[in-house]
Image (cartoon, grey):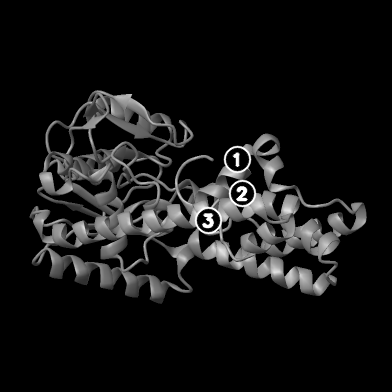
Amino acid sequence: MTVITHTNGDTYAVDDGLGFVLRHFGEPIWPRTISTHTTGERQILVYNREEALARFRQANLLDCRINAYPHHTGFGGINRQSPNFIFIDLDLSRFNSYNELDKALRSVLKNIKEKFRDAQPTVIWSGNSYHIYLPIQAFILESESVFAEFEHASKKFLRFSEKMLSNGKADPCHSSNLSLKNYMLRILGSHNWECVKRNNNHLDSTTEVKIIQKWNGNRPVINWLLRDFRRYLIQEKIDNNLAARKRARFLSEVKTTPAKRWIEILLDTPIEEYRRETIRLIIAPYLVNVRKLAYDDAFNIAKNWLNSCDKIRPLIFNADLKIKYDLRAATRVGYLPMAFDDLKSENGELYRSISNQFGAGDV
């Protein structure tokens, strides 16, 4: 195995690292977007290798990334790019130990080998996670009749392939946001800013993005995954239709039953966004000032709801502290939960987050 390393600002390694990543891409390579710590993850367009390297050096080699797909992937809202690159992110924070993380990596590599007949992807260690890069031979899915009925088939393939090949162990925040326009890959020889911060702002081999396994140059065909992918799209369509009907029933109940009833429905319904606002504006005052529950009982109900929310999308705040603060505030001030009809005008984002859990779109 080849490991590209550098210390003390040796930029030759990142030059090699960029070259290695570029060999995974098909033509056209340029123009393409990159991002660095200096850009604050904002993507900027570069037109050649030299311009990309200059940007990386300007950022002191921190958080250097390049898009796996070229800048021009569509025209007039129609996708013109095949999903010919698969990226899987196994984040350490999702596992209890390095052993579990390594076990997940072995499982991914086994799945890739079985699904793509002995394909060998690149494996990168970023300091926080394994990144698996696999170029494949693909075509524009939207142009094929079997996928024409499904919107954004190529984007959905990127998300499906990561989830399926990782057995659902890939970082869900990564998978749920993947698209052709934000498929950003770390560059070998660059440094992970999160690791640098933990290392007292010092750049060394422990903060550097390294290679664990090299791609063998074989580009397997996308066809090996398409049968499973089409089944996934069909099931997704069924699920979306069921969710739309469920949402319609929910909204009907909200409009025809007392406020107490819709909040009880909400307590059985995890949501992906605006969980903090929901606790503060609705759940805490409802449990304390409407149901008149004791503090411990109210806390347990709110915690169970947040735990269910965390399973569909990880929380990014301390649930216990948030619940304690809002329950005490509701008790002290005595305010009532916000009515559902008031959410649309008073807190539109929270209104959409709750209502969209039952299907896409506004009401």
The alpha-carbon separation of the residues under discs 2 and 1 comes to: 8 Å
Q: Secondary structure at mark 2?
A: loop
Q: Secondary structure at mark 3?
A: helix
Q: Image quadrant for the N terminus?
A: bottom left
Residue drawn at x 76%, y 69% as measured from the top left:
299
Residue highlighted by disc 2: 274
Q: Examine the image and state in which quarter residue 73 appears.
A: top left
Q: Nearer the viewer, residue 360 or 187?
A: 360
Residue 249 numbered tag: 3
Q: Nearer the viewer, residue 347 or 61?
A: 347
Q: Is residue 105 left or right of residue 93?
A: left
Q: Nearer the viewer, mark 2 or mark 1?
A: 1
Three-letter amino acid code of the residue under disc 2: Tyr
Three-letter amino acid code of the residue under disc 3: Arg
Question: Which is more N-terminal, label 3 or label 1?
Answer: 3
Residue highlighted by disc 1: 349
Residue drawn at x 43%, y 40% as measured from the top left:
62
Q: Is residue 43 left or right of residue 30?
A: right
Q: Check disc 2: other Cα within 10 Å, few if <14, some if 14-19, many if 20+.
A: some
Q: Examine the image and state in which quarter residue 145 appears.
A: top left
Residue 68: x and y, percent?
Answer: 25, 41
Is 170 rendered above or below residue 208? below
Q: Secondary structure at mark 1?
A: helix
Q: Are marks 2 and 1 in contact (CB under 8 Å)?
A: yes
Res. 161 visible in picture: no
Residue 107: x and y, percent?
Answer: 27, 72
Three-letter amino acid code of the residue under disc 1: Glu
The alpha-carbon separation of the residues under discs 2 and 3 comes to: 22 Å
